[in-house]
């Protein structure tokens, strides 16, 4: 996990590759479908923005790199290697750094896995999404079940113990029996990390239109909750630790990059549409900024070539902003928020802010929340309704800070 220092930061870094072959019907990420990609120009701009933002920050060491997207496995291994080498030269990338790439498990991209490893990648996240062909077609994926399993097998042979898989639940007409069968199959082939995501309806997507017009019927909220609880029970029974709302690990093989978000650490977002949280020095004081990069790739590249970076928005974070962000992210984990970590963002302790609240006491008596000597955290029951808990917590926080 990242540690905030007065003279520097152990930092995480996200690289956003914005291009995809197609737009999945459920996805509202910043992505672009282009027949021709000027990869050389994109590579130079990623490297330039990396150097600029590292110099703007208070970086001491970079401890993780994460290549996300879009579909970063469409990039060439040479591009990936160039970025990694630049991180070593300008950001003191540590020898033990976790360097992850998201992989779309098509036959073509699976053939590049060895080259990605040779380029410096030491962890892979495989986007299986489903082990059911009908659902893969519905989700707009361009790989088959067999493609996904081959890719996973190849990744595990190259990087044993360092491969994660993504799978979705809450798909149309998904039954409990089908879900259990799918999970059993997944457990027979997976490595030490599983990310389990609920299919959600995002405004502006094709899925949103289909659901609104009743062309697609998703499971009810109760059915979704039962699918989720079934997965938690089954995965924990096989030795997977449920360490975050959507993530499970064996042998403490956590995603250290994502732990940065969930524990309030600093990270730099590089590339079109990337987001970051960055500590900079301003008039002798250390301040934390929320930064957003230009969305459209060509506009972003133009900005990087002209200014050295494509930051389109930079906002100083106050105590309230950081408190809300810490609650929203840290409570996703099984550890929640420790008292020392909370005091890094607010000198008023958790117990003083929340301990006397009738709302918080009710949530505790309902076995949804725990506030004790360790800190503040959601129970397993509370994680299922975390969004609702956060609404209550932010309301109490706002009231307490305005007294």
Image: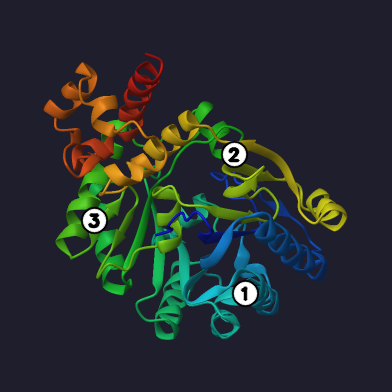
Quadrant position of residue 111: bottom right
Q: CA distance from mark 1 to mark 2?
A: 36 Å
> The C terminus lies in which quarter of the figure?
top left
Callout 1: helix, strand or loop? helix
Colouring convention used in this rendered image of the protein: rainbow
Tell me the mark number nearer the camera, choosing from 1 and 3: 1
Q: Which residue is mark 3?
A: 180
For the residues marked 3 and 2, what is the alpha-carbon distance in whole angstroms?
28 Å
Mark found first going from the N terminus, 1 or 2: 1
Numbered disc 2: secondary structure = helix
Q: Is residue 336 visible?
A: yes
Disc on res. 84: 1
Q: Where residue 68 appears, x then y in whole percent?
A: 57, 60
Comes first in the chain, label 3 or label 2: 3
Please tell me which residue lies in front, 188 or 157: 157
What x and y, as percent, mark residue 215?
Answer: 50, 33
Task: Give the residue at mark 2.
Answer: 206
Cα–Cα gap, marks 1 and 3: 40 Å
């Amino acid at each position: 996990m990242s540690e905030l220092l007065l003279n520097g930061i152990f930092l995480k870094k996200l690289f956003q590759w914005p291009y995809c072959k197609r737009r999945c019907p459920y996805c509202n990420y910043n992505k672009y479908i282009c027949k021709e990609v000027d990869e050389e120009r994109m590579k130079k701009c990623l490297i330039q923005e990396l150097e600029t933002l590292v110099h703007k920050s208070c970086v001491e060491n970079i401890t993780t790199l994460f290549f996300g997207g879009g579909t970063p496995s469409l990039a060439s291994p040479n591009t990936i290697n160039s970025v990694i080498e630049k991180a070593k030269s300008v950001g003191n990338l540590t020898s033990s750094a976790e360097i992850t790439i998201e992989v779309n498990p098509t036959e073509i991209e699976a053939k590049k896995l060895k080259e990605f490893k040779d380029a410096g990648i030491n962890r892979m996240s495989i986007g299986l999404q489903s082990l059911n062909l009908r659902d893969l077609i519905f989700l707009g994926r361009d790989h088959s079940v067999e493609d996904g399993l081959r890719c996973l097998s190849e990744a595990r042979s190259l990087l044993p113990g360092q491969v994660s898989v993504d799978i979705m639940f809450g798909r149309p007409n998904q039954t409990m029996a089908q879900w259990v069968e799918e999970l059993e199959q997944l457990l027979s082939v997976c490595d030490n990390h599983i990310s389990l995501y609920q299919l959600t309806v995002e405004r502006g997507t094709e899925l949103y239109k289909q659901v609104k017009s009743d062309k697609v019927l998703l499971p009810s909220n109760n059915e979704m909750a039962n699918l989720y609880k079934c997965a938690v029970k089954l995965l924990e029974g096989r030795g997977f630790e449920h360490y975050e709302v959507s993530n499970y690990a064996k042998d403490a093989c956590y995603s250290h990059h994502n732990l940065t978000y969930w524990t309030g650490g600093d990270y730099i977002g590089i590339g079109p549409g990337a987001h970051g949280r960055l500590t900079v020095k301003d008039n002798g004081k250390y301040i934390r900024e929320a930064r957003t990069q230009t969305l459209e790739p060509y506009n972003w590249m133009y900005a990087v070539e002209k200014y050295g970076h494509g930051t389109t928005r930079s906002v100083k974070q106050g105590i309230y902003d950081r408190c809300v962000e810490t609650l929203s992210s840290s409570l996703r984990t099984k550890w929640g928020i420790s008292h020392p970590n909370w005091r890094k963002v607010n000198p008023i302790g958790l117990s003083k802010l929340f301990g006397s609240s009738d709302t918080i006491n009710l949530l505790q008596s309902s076995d949804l929340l725990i506030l004790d000597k360790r800190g503040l955290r959601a129970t397993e029951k509370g994680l299922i309704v975390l969004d609702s808990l956060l609404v209550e917590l932010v309301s109490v926080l706002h009231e307490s800070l305005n007294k």
